[in-house]
Amino acid sequence: MTLLDAPASARVLDAVRAVQRSELEASAAFSRLDLMSGAVGLGLFGAAAAEVGADPTLAEAALARAFERFNALGAGPGLHDGLAGLGLFAQLTFDLSSALLPVDRRLTEVARSPGVLLSLRSGLAGLALYASTRLATESGAALAAAVVERLETLAVAHRGALTWPTPTAYAKGHGLTVLAEPVLEPGLAHGQAGVLVGLAALARGGVARARALLAPALDWLWQVERPGPSRFGWAMFGGGTDAPVQALYDLSWCTGDAGVARAAWLAAEVLAEPKQQARALALARAVAGEVLAGKSPGLAHRPDLCCGAAGVGHIFNLFFADTFEPPFAEAARRALGPLLERLPPLEAGSFQFGRLGVLAALIAATTDAAFAWELALGVRLLPAPGAG
Ligand SMILES: [Zn+2]
């Protein structure tokens, strides 16, 4: 069952087909590598657009461009800002399995190196999502093992559960005013929910040591949950019961309740624990309820995947596909429906903040197909091996 009806879907597909490859190739995004603002993001959009009948050559052109950029300039390891994102795109869209052996090896070194980050965006959580696409290969399995081993080492016991404090320099880099250490964040892009979904991806692929970390990681989220709204849209400094807190975007994919609800649900699904599933679903229903009561899905006036309505609407769309509960469909339509009239200009071409990410969420609302970009954002996992 698709979210949008036939006339609305036709309008989305018109907007998708209107995106010209030549315009994208002339954009600043094409000259960068990364997933969130560069060629890999263009390629992920191109692969999604091709699934619904648009120009199939964009994804290939973007892949060639990303490899060219990498060979000329190198890249950091991160999923959203470097090599792991290129690897995920190449594996899921083109199945370049043997060509990715050196990528696996390089990222395995990174996972073991001092100073490795933790986040889905740039650190171990993102490497875990990439590794989940590579578990059928020896080098991919070795990467997964190195990532999990490092997460075991870096886990900190906190209020009887496990958490992964944000490195202070990274916290400052994404705009936090660090008042005390450790910095603790629940959110998907930078914090605990990202680690949780990375572990869930590997656990679903059969990595037992990842599965062992899942329940204590999920327990930490439930222990720090605050009364709504904004149960999880904050960062905490110092970790005591009276620790100071900085408010972040409260309902968004990146730092807010929608992203955390999705990560908690995916982890609970992998654990196959009815109590955890019920709690994650209750959270998702509460967030959808806020949107249905009139709250802005993400930052007001922001259409984008990261902080705005496209990311939140897509999460509700996925919850509807998983549960068939009508309020999720209604909340998803509330978030996604107006976006076609509010598309950001193509020049603001990043996948994270621009038109292509918004169109990717709208494409997904016209079909039941799964897309590589959904794994890159930690909102959908690959099927379990043997699940078909
Ligand atoms: Zn954001």
Image: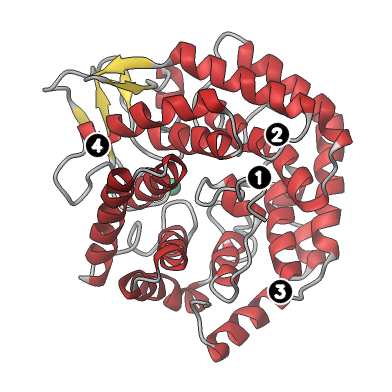
In this view, the mark in front (4 or 2): 2
Please tell me the numbered disc located at residue 135: 2
Where does residue 281 sit, x and y in percent of width and height? 31, 55
Query: Closer to the camera: disc 3 or disc 2?
Result: 2
Q: Which mark is residue 235?
A: none
First of labels 3, 2 by sequence position: 3
Q: Quadrant of residue 371?
A: bottom right
Looking at this view, name the residue that lies furthest to the left. 242
Q: Label 3 amino acid?
A: Val
- Disc 3 to disc 2, C-alpha distance: 28 Å
* Residue picked out by circle 4: 222
Q: Viewer-nearest of labels 1 and 4?
A: 1
Q: Report if residue 348 is visible in the image.
A: yes
Q: Tell me, yes or no, whether the two marked residues, 2 and 1, touch with CB atoms within 8 Å.
A: yes
Image point (42%, 50%), residue name = 253
Alpha carbon distance from label 1 to label 3? 26 Å
**First along the sequence among labels 1 and 4:** 4
Mark 1: few, some, or many residues within 10 Å (few <14, many ≥20)? Answer: few
Q: Give the distance between the C-alpha atoms of the residues marked 4 and 3, in whole angstroms.
A: 39 Å
Disc 4 residue type (three-letter)? Trp
Compare residues 169 and 206 and report the one nearer the observer: 206
What label sits on residue 385 in the rendered view?
Answer: 1
Q: Which amino acid does label 2 sit on?
A: Leu
**Between marks 1 and 4, how big is the CA–CA gap?**
29 Å
Q: In this view, does 359 lie to the left or right of 212?
A: right
- Residue at the spot 43% in from the left edge and 77% down from the top edge: 338
Q: In this view, does 257 lie above or below 51?
A: above
Q: Mark 3 points at which residue?
A: 52
Question: Which is nearer the N-term, disc 2 or disc 1?
Answer: 2
